């Protein structure tokens, strides 16, 4: 089973300004721009990794502007089973989206993690 850090997912109160900032300042390239799980998401490729910009104002409290870290795996079921066997509790089960499956959990200090697996034929998330 392979697991890799894929992206940081950030909130944006003005998604156009946020995307423009990363494009103009760092040469980020838009590789994906569409609605996912009810909100517009823009995936920016930058330096071999990605930033997902989420069209939602930053939240107060946990994480501030950082929503979560995305960890991609090639076997979500096996990863979740391994983590549950070690005592991690997932408040919600695996969720199904058009192009990927995912589950959210908390790491130490309340850092939110998204564990996900891309569905065959939907390699849009490949960096």
Image (spheres, rainbow, N blue to C red):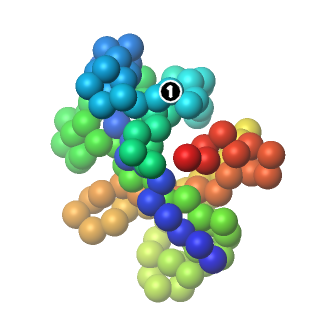
- Give x and y (percent) for residue 51: 40, 39
Residue at 74% from the left image edge and 51% from the top image edge = 119
Front residue of 9/88: it is 9
Residue at 46% from the left image edge and 71% from the top image edge = 89
In the displayed orientation, state which residue is furthest to the right.
Answer: 121
Front residue of 11/8: it is 8
- Give x and y (percent) for residue 126: 61, 47
Q: Quadrant of the N terminus?
A: bottom right
* Image position of 92 with respect to 77: above or below: above
Q: Quadrant of residue 60?
A: top left
Residue at 39% from the left image edge and 45% from the top image edge = 47
- Give x and y (percent) for residue 113: 41, 57
* Image position of 86 with respect to 33: above or below: below
Q: Is residue 4 visible?
A: yes
Instruction: Determine whether the residue tagged by mark 1 lies in a helix, strand or loop.
Output: strand
Q: Is residue 18 visible?
A: no
Front residue of 102/93: it is 102
Q: Residues within 10 Å of mark 1 (few under 14, many from 20)?
A: some
* Image position of 56 with respect to 112: above or below: above
- Asked if residue 79 lies left or right of residue 23, the reply is right
Q: Which residue is mark 1?
A: 30
Residue at 74% from the left image edge and 43% from the top image edge = 122
- Give x and y (percent) for residue 34: 59, 24
* Image position of 17 with respect to 115: above or below: above
Front residue of 108/46: it is 46
């Amino acid at each position: 089973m392979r697991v890799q850090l894929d992206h940081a997912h950030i909130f944006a109160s003005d998604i156009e300004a946020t995307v423009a900032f990363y494009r103009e300042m760092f040469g980020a390239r838009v590789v994906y721009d569409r609605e996912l799980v009810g909100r517009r998401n823009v995936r920016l490729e930058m330096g071999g990794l990605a930033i997902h910009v989420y069209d939602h104002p930053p939240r107060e409290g946990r994480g501030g502007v950082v929503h979560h870290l995305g960890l991609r795996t090639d076997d979500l079921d096996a990863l979740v089973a391994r983590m549950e066997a070690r005592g991690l509790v997932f408040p919600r089960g695996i969720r199904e989206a058009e192009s990927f499956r995912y589950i959210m959990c908390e790491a130490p200090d309340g850092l939110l993690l998204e564990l996900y697996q891309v569905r065959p034929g939907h390699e849009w998330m490949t960096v």
